[in-house]
Image (cartoon, rainbow, N blue to C red):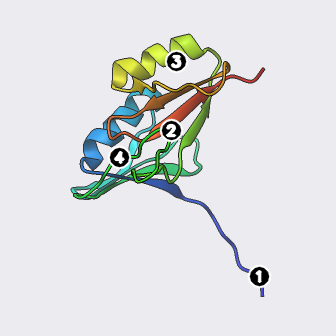
């Protein structure tokens, strides 16, 4: 038996779905595809999988890098960019914070406003 699968979205928990969606919209430029008080989805205009933000009132941000007995990261987003410094300035202006620990020279780890780690990287 064969069946078709289509990844439609990666979902991030947050206490503020609209606020977190606005953060990612500010630097990705993706429009809001759907929205209600507990869920917001952004989709790229050319199609493809989007990002969704789901209300989780008891959300606890992950610790990066992980430590024993602390909330661990479940996933992170990677964004390939042309210029780490310029893109870093854009995401910081939108509300991201540069993580204290940086594992590689060609990658920058940031924390979004809800504390989710994400990476900007350049191909070397």
Task: Specify which label sits upstream in the sequence, 2 or 1.
Answer: 1
Q: Residue furthest bottom?
A: 1
Mark 2–mark 4 distance (CA, rounded to whole Å)? 12 Å
Q: Quadrant of residue 27?
A: top left
Picture disc at residue 77? none
Tag 3 near tag 4, CB within 8 Å: no
* Residue 88, percent from left and from top: 49, 18
Helix or strand or loop: what does disc 4 sit on? loop
Q: Which residue is mark 2?
A: 65
Picture disc at residue 87? 3
Q: Which residue is mark 1?
A: 2
Helix or strand or loop: what does disc 1 sit on? loop
- Front position among marks 2 and 4: 2
- Front position among marks 3 and 4: 4
Mark 1–mark 4 distance (CA, rounded to whole Å)? 38 Å
Helix or strand or loop: what does disc 3 sit on? helix
Helix or strand or loop: what does disc 2 sit on? loop
Q: Residue furthest front?
A: 68
Q: Residues within 10 Å of mark 2 (few under 14, many from 20)?
A: few
Q: Which residue is mark 4?
A: 61
The one of 18 and 105 positioned closer to us in this rendering: 105
* Residue 16, percent from left and from top: 24, 47
- Say which quadrant the C terminus sits in: top right
Mark 3–mark 1 distance (CA, rounded to whole Å)? 42 Å
* Residue 117, percent from left and from top: 47, 38
């Amino acid at each position: 038996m064969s069946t078709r699968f289509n990844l439609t979205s990666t979902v991030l928990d947050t206490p503020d779905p609209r606020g977190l969606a606005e953060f990612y919209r500010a630097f990705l430029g993706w429009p809001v595809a759907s929205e209600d008080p507990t869920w917001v989805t952004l989709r790229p205009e050319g199609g493809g999988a989007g990002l969704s933000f789901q209300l989780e009132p008891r959300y606890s941000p992950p610790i990066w890098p992980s430590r024993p007995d602390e909330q661990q990261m479940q996933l992170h987003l990677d964004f390939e960019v042309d210029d780490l410094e310029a893109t870093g300035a854009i995401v910081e202006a939108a509300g991201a914070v540069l993580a204290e620990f940086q594992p590689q020279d060609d990658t920058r780890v940031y924390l979004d406003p809800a504390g989710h780690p994400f990476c900007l990287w350049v191909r070397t």
